[in-house]
C-alpha cells in the first residue's frame, strides 16, 4: 500500500499532460499544491475546519497528513520505485495478459476491470490492469510474443485521448522507427457518434500499432454511447475476443468461480471518528492529492426556481452560496460537479434484498488482496455510506453481471431466470425496457416470496458495482458579477418507460436537485426521501468546481457568435451577464450574436426576460438574438426551426465576424447540435465562399486550436 501511494504521488510530477483540458487541470493542481506549502495557510484552514461545530463536518481522516513528519515522507519516497516498464511488471507479477485502460470519466476503466475478472473466471487467465499513465509507452516494445495486450480507450474533447493516455498518444503519434513485431493485441474504443470525431482515439492508436508491425488478434471493437449501448457493444466484442482465445490461441474454457480481489469485513474495533460516512472522495483527486476530499464542499442551496415545467420535463435554476468557503473559487465557464445521493428507498431495498439491514451501520474495513488492484472506495466505512453515497446502486444494470450472480441465487427458479436473461440479449433488453431495473430491483424481481440473497459477498458488490460519479452542470452565473454565488440550470426529465408516464426512471442527480429545491420551499417536508444517514445540513449538497477551458476572450471588445440549444444557454447567460456589467462600466464591448434553439417559445425559452433585458441594455447594435423553436404549433411549418438553420440564414454575418473581425464562436448544449452546426458551417463555406473541404477543415482546426471556437457540449 505504501509503495502504491508513493508511486501515485510520484505520477503527479510526470510530464504526461498536454492539451487544453489538462493544462487547466495542471494550473489548478499547481494552485492546490502551492496552497499546501504555507504552514500558516494549513493552520488557518485546519482551525477553521475543526472549529466547524457540525456533526456532519467530522474530523478529516487525512488530517494527520497535514502534520506528517518530513522524514516519514522521505522514507516513503525512498522505497523502491515501482517499475514503469510494462514487460518487467508482467514478468514480476507472472501475468499472461495486460489490459491497458485510458479513461476520463471511468467507463473504460470499469470495463477493463470487468474484462480482467472475466478472463480469469472463464479461462483462468491472469491479467494485469494497467493505467496507461503508470507505464512508459516505449516499454510496450518489450512485451514478449507470449503475452497478450489489450487496449481499452475512450475519446474525449475534440477527438482527443483521455488525460491518462497522453503519454501513449504522443508516443504513437511521434515515433517513427518502432518495431512491434512481437506485439499481439486486441483493442476496444469507447465513444459517442453524436460527436464529430467518433472513436478517434482508438482509431489513431491502433493504426499506429499496426504501422509498427503489431498484430491485431481481432477487429477493433467500438462502443457508441449515443445509442446507450456501451456495455452491450463491449460484451459483443468480448464474446469475439473469447471466441478468438478458444479457436485461435487454444485456451480452454473453465469456470473458476468467484475469486475475490479484495476483502470487506465488519470491524467493530475501528475508531468511529475514522469512518467515512458519505463525504465524497473525488476519484481523480484521490490519485493526485491522496486526501482526495480537499475540493469537495458542502454548499447551501439559497435559491431555486422553475424556469419551466411540463409533463415530460422541467428545468430548474438553482443558486448555491459559496461564502462559507473562502478557498472555493470559480471562473465564468467552469462546471459545478454535483455529488448526488441515492434515494433512501433504493438503499433500503438493496439492504433488504441482501438481508443486511441489521448491519447497515456496522463499520466495514476494505482491503485489497490482489496486488495491482486499486481500491475504489474509502475505508473504513459503512453499508449506509456505501449504498447511500459511494456506490452507483441506481444505475442501469448490465447483462454481464448476471452470469456471476448465478452462483449466489437463493433458489433454483431465480438461478434459471438469471441464466435465461444472461444468455439472451434480446430478452434482457426487453426486460429492461419494460421495467425500471437496478441491482436491488433485479434481486427483488427474481426472488421468490421476497427471499433475500444472503450469500452474495460484500466484496463481490464492491468489485462489480461502479462507484457513484459526480454529474457536471455548466455554471450559469458570472464569477465577475456574483463571485460568491454559483448558479446552474438543470433539465429534469421524466423518461417514461414504454410511453407510460406513471413508469419513469428518474435521473439520479436531477431528481436529487429537484428534491433539494422542494426542501427549500417546505423545510422538513422531504426528509423521508433523502438518504438514510444525514451527513449534510438541510438543503446542502456536496459539490466541487470542475475547471473548464470554456472561457471568454480576455478582451471584451472581441465580437462573439454564441450558439446554444436547451440548457446550453447556461454558460452563455454568464458570458452575457459579464458583458453587460462591463458595458455598464463604460468599457468597450464587442457585438454578440446569439442563436438559441429550444422546443417551444411558450414553454422552453430559458431566461427569455433576462436575454431581452440584456438586449435593451446593450442595444440591438451590440446584441442580437436569433431563435429557433422545433416544436411550436404556432410556427410556420415551412420555416425551418433548428438553430443550425438560423446559422445558415445569417452565415454572411458570421463569416465576416469570424474571418474579418477576429470574432470567437461558442457552441453549447447537445453534442448532436454541435456536430450539426459543424456540418452547416462546412456546407456554407463551400457554397457561399467556394472553400474546398481541406481549406474549411484546416481553418476549423486552427480556430479550435487557437481557442477561437470553443464548445461546451454533452449528451
Ligand atoms: C460537460 C457537461 C456539462 C453539462 N452541463 C449541463 C447543464 O448545464 N445542464 C443540464 O441539465 N445538464 C448538463 N449536463 C448533463 C448532466 O451532467 C447530467 O448528465 C444530466 O443532468 C443527467 O444526470 P442525472 O444524474 O439526473 O441522470 P442519470 O441518473 O445519470 O441518468 C441518465 C439517463 O439514464 C437513465 N437511467 C438512469 N438509471 C437507469 C436505470 N437503472 N436503468 C435504465 N436507465 C436508467 C435515466 O433515465 C436518464 O435518461 C452536462 C454534462 C456534461 C458532461
Ligand atoms: C465532454 C465530452 C466529449 C466527448 N468527445 C467525444 C468525441 O470527440 N468522440 C467520441 O467518439 N466520443 C466522445 N465522447 C463520448 C465518450 O467517449 C464516452 O462517453 C465514453 O463512454 C466515456 O468513457 P470514459 O468514462 O472511460 O472516459 C465525449 C464525451 C464527453 C462527456
Ligand atoms: C479493524 O480496524 C482496525 C482499526 O482501524 C484495523 O487496525 C484493523 O486492521 C481492522 N481489521 C481488519 C480485519 O481489517
Image (spheres, rainbow, N blue to C red):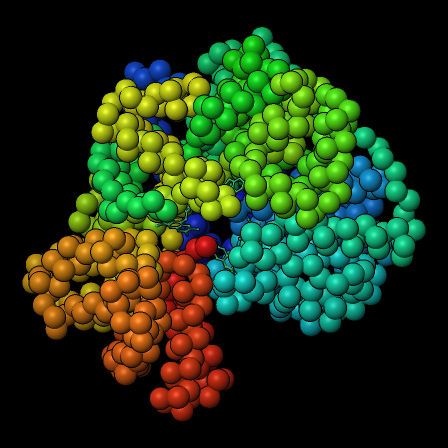
User: Residue 683's spot in the image, x, y percent?
Assistant: 42, 82
Q: Position of residue 66 (x, y in %)?
A: 43, 26
Name the residue rendered at 52%, 13% in the picture. 361
Q: Is residue 496 above or below residue 557?
A: above
User: Which of the 4 quarters of the picture holds residue 410?
Assistant: top right
**Residue 105 appears in the figure:** yes
Left-right relation of 28 to 321:
right
Judge whether residue 49 can be spotted in this image.
no
Q: Nearer the viewer, residue 288 or 520?
A: 520
Residue found at the far bottom of this picture: 690
234 left or right of 285? right
Image quadrant containing the N terminus: top right
653 left or right of 528 in image = left
Q: Say which quarter of the image contains residue 264.
A: top right
Residue 376 spot, x, y in % from top left: 58, 33
**Label tally:** 0
Is 75 drawn above or below residue 196 in the view shown?
above
Outermost residue on the top side: it is 269
Q: Residue at x 83, y 46 (%)?
A: 96
Residue 279 x/y as whole percent: 43, 27
Q: Is residue 352 above or below residue 433?
A: above
Residue shown at 57%/44% (left/top)? 433
**Residue beneath the point at 34% across and 68% down:** 642
Amino acid at each position: 500500500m505504501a509503495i502504491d501511494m508513493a508511486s501515485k504521488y510520484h505520477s503527479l510530477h510526470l510530464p504526461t499532460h498536454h492539451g487544453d483540458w489538462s493544462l487547466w487541470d495542471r494550473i489548478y493542481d499547481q494552485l492546490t499544491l502551492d496552497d499546501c506549502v504555507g504552514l500558516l495557510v494549513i493552520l488557518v484552514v485546519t482551525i477553521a475546519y475543526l472549529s466547524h461545530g457540525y456533526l456532519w463536518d467530522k474530523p478529516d481522516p487525512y488530517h494527520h497528513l497535514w502534520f506528517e513528519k518530513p522524514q516519514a515522507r522521505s522514507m516513503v519516497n525512498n522505497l523502491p520505485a515501482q517499475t514503469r516498464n510494462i514487460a518487467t511488471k508482467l514478468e514480476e507479477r507472472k501475468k499472461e495478459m495486460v489490459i491497458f485502460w485510458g479513461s476520463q470519466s471511468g467507463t473504460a476503466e470499469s470495463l477493463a476491470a470487468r474484462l480482467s475478472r472475466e478472463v480469469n473466471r472463464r479461462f483462468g487467465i491472469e491479467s494485469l490492469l494497467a493505467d496507461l499513465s503508470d507505464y512508459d509507452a516505449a516499454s510496450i516494445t518489450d512485451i514478449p510474443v507470449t503475452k497478450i495486450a489489450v487496449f481499452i480507450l475512450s475519446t474525449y474533447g475534440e477527438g482527443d485521448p483521455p488525460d491518462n493516455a497522453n503519454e501513449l498518444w504522443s508516443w504513437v503519434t511521434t515515433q517513427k522507427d518502432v518495431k512491434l513485431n512481437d506485439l499481439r493485441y486486441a483493442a476496444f474504443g469507447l465513444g459517442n457518434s453524436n460527436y464529430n470525431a467518433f472513436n478517434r482515439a482508438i482509431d489513431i492508436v491502433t493504426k499506429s500499432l499496426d504501422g509498427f508491425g503489431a498484430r491485431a488478434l481481432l477487429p477493433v471493437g467500438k462502443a457508441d454511447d449515443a445509442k446507450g449501448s456501451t456495455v452491450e457493444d463491449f460484451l459483443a466484442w468480448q464474446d469475439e475476443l473469447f471466441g478468438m482465445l478458444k479457436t485461435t490461441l487454444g485456451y480452454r474454457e473453465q469456470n473458476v468461480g468467484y475469486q475475490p480481489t479484495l476483502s470487506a469485513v465488519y470491524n467493530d474495533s475501528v475508531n468511529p471518528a475514522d469512518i467515512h460516512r458519505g463525504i465524497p472522495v473525488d476519484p481523480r483527486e484521490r490519485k493526485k492529492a491522496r486526501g482526495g476530499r480537499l475540493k469537495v464542499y458542502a454548499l447551501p442551496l439559497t435559491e431555486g426556481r422553475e424556469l419551466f415545467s411540463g409533463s415530460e420535463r422541467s428545468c430548474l435554476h438553482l443558486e448555491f452560496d459559496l461564502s462559507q468557503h473562502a478557498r472555493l473559487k470559480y471562473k465564468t465557464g467552469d462546471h459545478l460537479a454535483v455529488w448526488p445521493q441515492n434515494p433512501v428507498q433504493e438503499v433500503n431495498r438493496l439492504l433488504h434484498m441482501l438481508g443486511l439491514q441489521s448491519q447497515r451501520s456496522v463499520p466495514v474495513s476494505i482491503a485489497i488482496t490482489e496486488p495491482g488492484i486499486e481500491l475504489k472506495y474509502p475505508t473504513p466505512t459503512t453499508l449506509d455510506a456505501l449504498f447511500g453515497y459511494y456506490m452507483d446502486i441506481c444505475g442501469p444494470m448490465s447483462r454481464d453481471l448476471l452470469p456471476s450472480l448465478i452462483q449466489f441465487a437463493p433458489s433454483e427458479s431465480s438461478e434459471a431466470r438469471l441464466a435465461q436473461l444472461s444468455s439472451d440479449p434480446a430478452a434482457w433488453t426487453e426486460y429492461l425496457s419494460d421495467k425500471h431495473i437496478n441491482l436491488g430491483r433485479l434481486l427483488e424481481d427474481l426472488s421468490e416470496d421476497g427471499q433475500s440473497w444472503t450469500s452474495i459477498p460484500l466484496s463481490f458488490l464492491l468489485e462489480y458495482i461502479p462507484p457513484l460519479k459526480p454529474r457536471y452542470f455548466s455554471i450559469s452565473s458570472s464569477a465577475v458579477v456574483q463571485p460568491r454565488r454559483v448558479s446552474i440550470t438543470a433539465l429534469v426529465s421524466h423518461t417514461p418507460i414504454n410511453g407510460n408516464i406513471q413508469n419513469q426512471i428518474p435521473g439520479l442527480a436531477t431528481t436529487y436537485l429537484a428534491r433539494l429545491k422542494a426542501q427549500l420551499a417546505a423545510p422538513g417536508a422531504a426528509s423521508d426521501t433523502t438518504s438514510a444517514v444525514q451527513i449534510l445540513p438541510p438543503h446542502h449538497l456536496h459539490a466541487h468546481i470542475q475547471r473548464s477551458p470554456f472561457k471568454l476572450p480576455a478582451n471584451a471588445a472581441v465580437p462573439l457568435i454564441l450558439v446554444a440549444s436547451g440548457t446550453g444557454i447556461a454558460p452563455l447567460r454568464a458570458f452575457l451577464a459579464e458583458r453587460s456589467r462591463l458595458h455598464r462600466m463604460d468599457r468597450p464591448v464587442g457585438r454578440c450574436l446569439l442563436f438559441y434553439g429550444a422546443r417551444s417559445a411558450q414553454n422552453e425559452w430559458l431566461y427569455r426576460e433576462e436575454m431581452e433585458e440584456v438586449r435593451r441594455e446593450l442595444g440591438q447594435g451590440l446584441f442580437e438574438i436569433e431563435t429557433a423553436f422545433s416544436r411550436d404549433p404556432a410556427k410556420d411549418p415551412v420555416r425551418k426551426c433548428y438553430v443550425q438553420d438560423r446559422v445558415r440564414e445569417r452565415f454572411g454575418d458570421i463569416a465576416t465576424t469570424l474571418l474579418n473581425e477576429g470574432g470567437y464562436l461558442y457552441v453549447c448544449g447537445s453534442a448532436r447540435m454541435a456536430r450539426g452546426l459543424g456540418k452547416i458551417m462546412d456546407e456554407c463555406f463551400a457554397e457561399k465562399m467556394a472553400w474546398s473541404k481541406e481549406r474549411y477543415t484546416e481553418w476549423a482546426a486552427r480556430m479550435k486550436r487557437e481557442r477561437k471556437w470553443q464548445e461546451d457540449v454533452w449528451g
